[in-house]
Amino acid sequence: MSQFEIRYAREDEVGTVLSFIRALADYEKMSSDVVATEELLREWIFDKKICEVLFAVENGIPVGFALFFHNFSTFLGRGGIYLEDLFVLPAYRGKGYGKKLLCKLAEIAVERNCGRLEWSCLNWNQPSIDFYLSMGAIPMEEWTTYRLTGEALEKAARMQA
């Protein structure tokens, strides 16, 4: 019988975090976008504590992960949790580990008195969309995500108001 737990990633597991990020990027057909390194992840996750990582662990082996951080709702007047990545290795899917990770995040949000838990999902990823809907999540169709990166971010940083 398998032993299962959800636990926080340790600093000595930063390589495992990066391997999950790469596996997710491969699944999302975005592998070429990954520029993260172990050094960068160590700095931002463990030194600066900008985000947190949970592992789904079966028999001592990490088989899934969730990377999240706090955001803030001015309308609610309190923080929330933003789930950046949720991924379970293909060989371990169908065991409910993704659901357990999402439920653990909901538990953390409630414990921390957060107003909400939110995330984004690629429009083509119907298996994930179906999963999120089955959990009671509501798509925010009236909102569009905008992003500044690279040269556009640098240019905006140089602009005068």
Image (cartoon, rainbow, N blue to C red):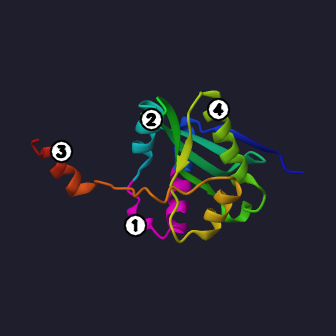
For the residues labelled 3 and 1, the Cα–Cα distance comes to 25 Å
Q: Which-is-in-front pick, marks 3 and 1? A: 3
Task: Please rate how many residues cluster around mark 2, counting C-alpha atoms within 10 Å: few if below 14, some from 14 to 19, many from 20.
Answer: few
Between tags 1 and 2, which lies in front?
A: 2
**Numbered mark located on residue 75 in the image:** 2
Which of marks 1 and 3 precedes in the sequence? Answer: 1
- Which structural element holds mark 2? loop
Residue for point 41% across, 52% down: 36
Q: Residue 157, labelled with which disc?
A: 3
Q: Quadrant of residue 108?
A: top right
Amino acid under disc 4 = Val
> How far apart in space, not on screen, are marks 4 and 1 (Cα)?
36 Å
Q: CA distance from mark 2 to mark 3?
A: 27 Å
What is the C-alpha distance between the residues marked 1 and 2? Answer: 37 Å
Query: What residue does disc 1 label?
Result: 32
The Cα atoms of the two marked residues, 4 and 3, are separated by 36 Å
Question: What amino acid is found at the position of numbered circle 3 in the picture?
Answer: Ala
Tell which of 40 and 72 is nearer to you: 72
Q: Are marks 2 and 3 in contact (CB under 8 Å)?
A: no
Q: Please say whether residue 38 is visible from this viewpoint.
A: yes
Please name the predominant secondary structure of the magenta segment in the image: helix
Q: Circle 4 sits on which residue? A: 110
In magenta stretch: residue 44: no
In which quadrant will I find the C terminus?
top left
For the point 12% across and 45% down, the residue is 158
Q: Is residue 73 above or below residue 95?
A: above
